[in-house]
Image: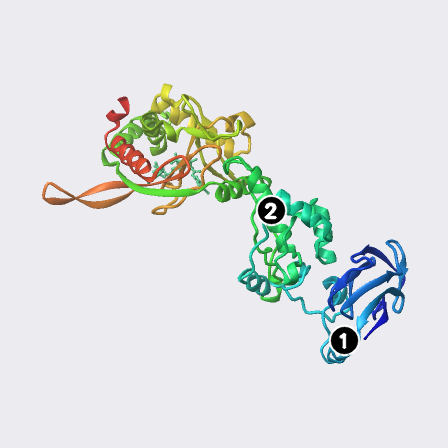
Amino acid sequence: MSEIKKVRVPDIGDFKDVPVIEILVKAGDELAAEDSLITLESDKATIEVPSPYAGTVKTISVKVGDRVSEGSEILSMEVSAEHTDEAAKAAQSEQAEPPEQTERTASSDNGQDKAQPEHEGAADTVSAEQASAYRGSARQPSQMISASQDSKQAEVKPHAGPSVRRFARQLGVDLSKVIGSGPKQRILKEDVQAFVKQALSKSQNLGVGGGGFDLLPWPHVDFAKFGPIELKSLTRIKQISGANLHRNWVMIPHVTQFDEADITDLEALRKEYNENQQAQAGTKLTILAFLMKAATAALKKFPEFNASLDSSNGEANLVIKRYYHLGFAVDTPSGLVVPVIRDIDQKGVMMIADELGKLSSLAREGKLKPTDMQGASFTISSLGGIGGTAFTPIINAPEVAILGVSRATLKPVYRNGEFVPRLILPLSLSYDHRVIDGASAARFTSHLASILADMRLALF
Ligand code: CAO
């Protein structure tokens, strides 16, 4: 036995005259109880109305654009008596434990909702803990479907909730191409995200182009709850360099090679020179000027460190530079800047030291021109004047390596049967592992250390 049942808009809270934005079924459709029938969209929320019965759709009484309220007829269904009984039981249990029939935004608006990640739209509102639990579930992300699946899928209306449909519309995703991983292949927001991610990764050029990360939202904490706070805006330099550092950190697979150089003899030479110069008030020679010269000699021997990755023609190439323009990080009151000294290979340490001093002063006064900071093929970041034993500098893209230098200290070194005090300079070389292998990095820093121990090697 079966009977015809009219399905009406259920209690939708305070919403009245809400426009119908989607009709999700058609006459003849076989439905299970809880399948979505229509989508309503008020100015505050999107509401999906589920079927109270299992059965066959006979007639549809609304069309897109109609305005409905509680009690408005939606459609009629042929329902078997058995299903009607089940529905009655379900309705009873619903009263004890209301199901989630409406969109998150609607229910959270009236304060009745607790977001549950199993349903679409939840990702908009879930807490960090809920989201991480969701990500940890066994659900498989959706995949792009083949052309044959595509045509089959086109006959079937994609099974997705309103927030997911809206999300897909915003991103321009054709839901018929997305495979749902929810119950009854329902398409979840995650499936749309996975679809977009896959499409993006297909269009990327060998990992050198843009990138997408399916990360949790940043936690927003009201710190004032825990004690007094003060707001300070980041300087313009920090905002610009921060964005660059962030991109470089996430897009370049960094590895840092640590090494040490014995600069005892170099330091003796430097001090002797500076003492003579002080009498004449000449340029002060710092370790950094020697480091630039030594690094240039090492770059000549290992050209892949003086290079950039390029994928503009669709395949990955290494652009090896036959010029030696070295950037050096300068700590200024407004933030980090990196002026560049050009053609180090053609300059002596005195000329380099002179430019270092001038560019550092301009940097601290905020007077560097854009051209002063362009064209570097390799960068040195020296924290030696401040302290520290080692650090992991971030590569200054599109370069492929950066040398970090920490504070030189006297260390006991075993030589000819006895410990002797030697001045040891810590080196930290970060490199792009797509371009440089660990063995090459170890060879580079060993060679650099040999040059710093005996600058005559820079002549070869
Ligand atoms: N070990 C021991 N002493 C060192 C040293 C080292 N590696 N490097 C420099 N020093 C000494 C210098 O010899 C100098 O001592 P004296 O005054 O007795 O001669 C003193 O430290 C100060 O040197 P300096 O810092 O003025 O000069 P520099 O050429 O070494 O460095 C510059 C210039 C511009 C690189 C530096 O001032 C600077 O700004 N460093 C910070 C860079 C930075 O922030 N990097 C981090 C980037 S990532 O966030």
The numbered mark, 2 or 1, whose residue comes first in the sequence reads 1
Could you say whether the residue bearing mark 1 is in a helix, strand or loop? helix
**Color theme of the render:** rainbow
Question: Residue lying furthest front in this view?
Answer: 1
Q: Is residue 155 above or below residue 76?
A: above
Q: Amino acid at mark 1?
A: Ala
Q: Which residue is mark 2?
A: 144
Residue flagged by tag 2: what amino acid is it? Met
Horizontal arrangement in the rendering, residue 283 relative to residue 335 (left or right): left
- Callout 2 touching callout 1 (CB < 8 Å): no
Provide residue 100's location: percent of width, then percent of height: 72, 69
Q: Residue at x 44, y 42 (%)?
A: 253
How dense is the environment of label 2, judged by Cα within 10 Å: few (below 14), some, or many (20 and up)? some
Q: Quadrant of the C terminus?
A: top left
Left or right of residue 259, residue 173 in this image: right
Q: Residue at x 40, y 28 (%)?
A: 306
Q: Is residue 257 above or below residue 128?
A: above
What mark, if any, has residue 87 been given in the picture?
Answer: 1
Ligand 1 is found in which quarter of the picture? top left
Q: Residues within 10 Å of mark 1 (few under 14, many from 20)?
A: some
Residue 407 in view, yes or no = no
Is 44 in front, or is 311?
311
